[in-house]
Amino acid sequence: MAGPLLTRRQLGKRLRKLREHADMSTYDVERSKCINSRRTLARIENGQVTSMPYTVIGGLARLYGADTALASELERMYRAADEPGWYEEYGQAVREGFATFAEAEQTADRMCLYDPGVITGLCQIDAYASALFLLHPLYDKTGVEPARRFRKRRQRDYWGRVEREGGPQTTIILSETTVRRPVGGVEVLAAQLGRLRELARLPGVDLRILPLSVEDHPAPDAGSFTIFDFNDPLDPDIVYFEHLDGCRYVETIAAVAAYRVVFDALHDHAIAVEEFLGGHFPVAQIEP
């Protein structure tokens, strides 16, 4: 089940589709007095937080021609969107904007992730994650413990769902430089690579390494990104980007399609993690 942030997005999409099907403009809705302004309507349709009685949502649905059952369902979604998410207990350990990512991880039907910088959070062992937190010059060191707990919760829920349900389908591509960098020391790196081997054996998981030996890098200008696919047509696929000062979500069809083409090209050049570690870069050969 989607968390409050994704539920709010789904609600907005459904209301927009109902309005468009009813051939009503935002100006028509404002004139109906069902809602106080077009700006508020835009916030609802864009999945943003609004403060109003849940009955307003039902009123909008009925204005658009929805029956009583659908209007009640949309009211229920609006109330659910106001419930606290599981991530809120971790406070500022969850960086601004990342909560939507955490929800998408737990509800997507397929995830494709490319990270040329570090071994991605879902795959990190505790010692590797702690070293990253402590090394980062902008990270508040007093927040390391809640950040570690938040990451462990994400990992437990995600990989638990993979083991129990065989999904989501997961494809992760890391760069060779990522798996060579001894974050936390060579012993930590060896244990971390062992964890990658374990995860690669899980059902529906395709974990790959993009080797430095690839002469023609298919996407040298592509930073890290994640594509979330959802089977529900009312929940569009999302591309996620993370930056030093925040993050961004894009769901336009053209943008998602473009990043899917890039990801597929990277995948074609990458090597399965077991083949790479076993043949090109054995753990036993790591030197201090």
Image: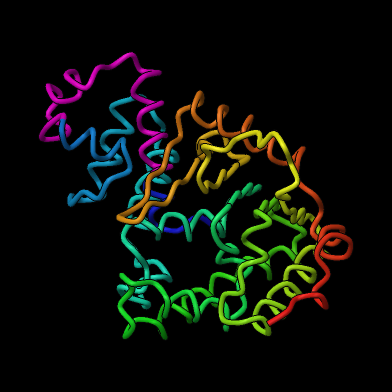
User: Taking 139 as reference, is 45 above or below it?
Assistant: above
Q: Residue at x 62, y 61 (%)?
A: 178
- The number of numbered badges drawn on the structure is 0
User: Taking 268 as reference, is 185 above or below it?
Assistant: below
- Measuring from the top left, give residue 284's x and y in whole percent: 83, 78
- Measuring from the top left, give residue 221's x and y in whole percent: 51, 37
Q: Residue 26 colored magenta?
A: yes
Q: Is residue 206 left or right of residue 156?
A: right
Region rendered in magenta = 9-38
- Measuring from the top left, give residue 177's x and y in whole percent: 63, 58
- Measuring from the top left, give residue 266's x and y in whole percent: 68, 39
**Magenta-highlighted stretch: main secondary structure?**
helix
Can you name the residue that lies furthest to the top here? 23
User: Taking 188 as reference, is 213 above or below it?
Assistant: above
Point out the image quarter for the N terminus.
bottom right
Point out the image quarter for the C terminus.
bottom right
Residue 250 quadrant: top left
Q: Residue at x 75, y 76 (%)?
A: 286
Q: Residue 273 colored magenta?
A: no
